Each structure stands twice: as C-alpha cells, then as structure tokens.
Image (cartoon, helix red, strand yellow):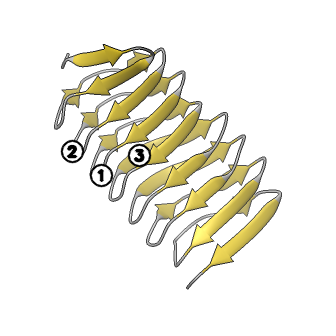
C-alpha cells in the first residue's frame, strides 16, 4: 500500500498513488491529483479529493470536496456537506448537509437534507433537497 502521512488528525496520500482494496482513514484525508482507489474509501472526517482522482466503489465520509474531473463509480454518502467541482463524475450523492454541484458535473440521483446549489449546466438524475438554487447557466 502506498505511504499515507499523518499530521495530527489529517492524513495525506502521495500524489499519483494507487490504492488496491478498501481504504479506511480515521480522520481527515487529503488526496492529491491523480490518486486512485480500486476499492471503497471510508473517511471518518473530511475528504478532499484532488483533480483527476478516482474511486472504483463507494465513498463514505463526513464532508467531501471532490476535485475537478474526478470519478467516483459508486455512491458518495456524507453526513455533512458535499462539493463536487467542475466536470467530475459521481454515481450518486446522499448528504446530510448542503450539496454544491459545479459546471459540467455528471451525477446520478442527489439527495440532500439541506440545500442543493447548482452552478452552471450539469447532468443529473433526481435532485431531492429542502431547497434548490440554480446559479448561472
């Protein structure tokens, strides 16, 4: 398994690393660009996933920021907020907090216990939230 560096309750993956199997992190996880996971990704804190990274199965975390042009092939489940940046692809999202979808995002169904905010044009399945805000075109 590639090296993961811990500083306090935050863990850092190596840029361009490939992780086989499932990965569980007890804390926050900062994933640089071009990092790939071939299994599930479980993060007890906030996941910050860099651009052009990928996860083969599902992601479970507290909060998530998914980098531009990243791919998550399974469901993304977050207890809190989720931000999906430009041109990322996510199978589906279930969040306890706000969900922000940026321009060019492709996502399946999105369920939020709070507001869903859409910036620009996206492709999605059903959008279910308390409020919906669409900004830009």
Q: Are marks 1 and 3 in contact (CB under 8 Å)?
A: no
Mark in front: 2 vs 3: 2
Comparing 51 with 125, the one in front is: 51
Disc number placed over residue 82 in the picture, else none: none
Camera sees residue 34? yes
For image coordinates 52% across by 78% down, the residue present is 121
* Mark found first going from the N terminus, 2 or 3: 2
Q: Are marks 1 and 2 in contact (CB under 8 Å)?
A: yes
Say few, some or many: other residues with alpha carbon within 10 Å of mark 2 (under 14 / 14 to 19 / 20 or more): some
96 displayed left or right of 59: right
Whole-percent x and y of residue 96? 72, 40
Q: Is residue 110 above or below residue 118?
A: above
Comparing 39 with 29, the one in front is: 29
State how far apart marks 1 and 2 are (Cα).
7 Å
State how far apart marks 2 and 3 are (Cα).
13 Å
Mark in front: 1 vs 3: 1
For image coordinates 72% across by 50% down, the residue present is 112
Q: Are marks 2 and 3 in contact (CB under 8 Å)?
A: no
Q: Is residue 95 above or below residue 126?
A: above
Say few, some or many: other residues with alpha carbon within 10 Å of mark 3 (under 14 / 14 to 19 / 20 or more): many
Disc number placed over residue 34 in the picture, else none: 2
**Residue corresponding to mark 3:** 72
Which image quarter is the N terminus in? top left
Disc number placed over residue 51 in the picture, else none: 1
Whole-percent x and y of residue 137? 55, 85
Whole-percent x and y of residue 41? 42, 28
Say which element carries label 2: loop
For image coordinates 38% across by 65% down, the residue present is 87
Say which element carries label 1: loop
* Mark found first going from the N terminus, 1 or 2: 2
């Amino acid at each position: 398994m590639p090296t993961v560096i811990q500083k306090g309750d935050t863990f850092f993956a190596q840029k361009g690393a490939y992780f086989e199997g499932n990965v569980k992190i007890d804390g926050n996880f900062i994933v640089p660009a071009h990092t790939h996971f071939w299994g599930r990704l479980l993060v007890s804190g906030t996941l910050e996933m860099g651009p052009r990274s990928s996860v083969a199965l599902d992601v479970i975390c507290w909060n998530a920021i998914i980098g531009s042009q990243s791919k998550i092939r399974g469901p993304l489940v977050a207890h809190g907020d989720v931000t999906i940046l430009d041109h990322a692809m996510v199978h589906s999202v279930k969040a306890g907090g706000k969900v922000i979808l940026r321009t060019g995002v492709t996502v399946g169904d999105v369920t939020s216990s709070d507001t869903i905010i859409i910036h620009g044009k996206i492709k999605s399945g059903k959008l279910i939230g308390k409020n919906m805000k669409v900004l830009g075109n």
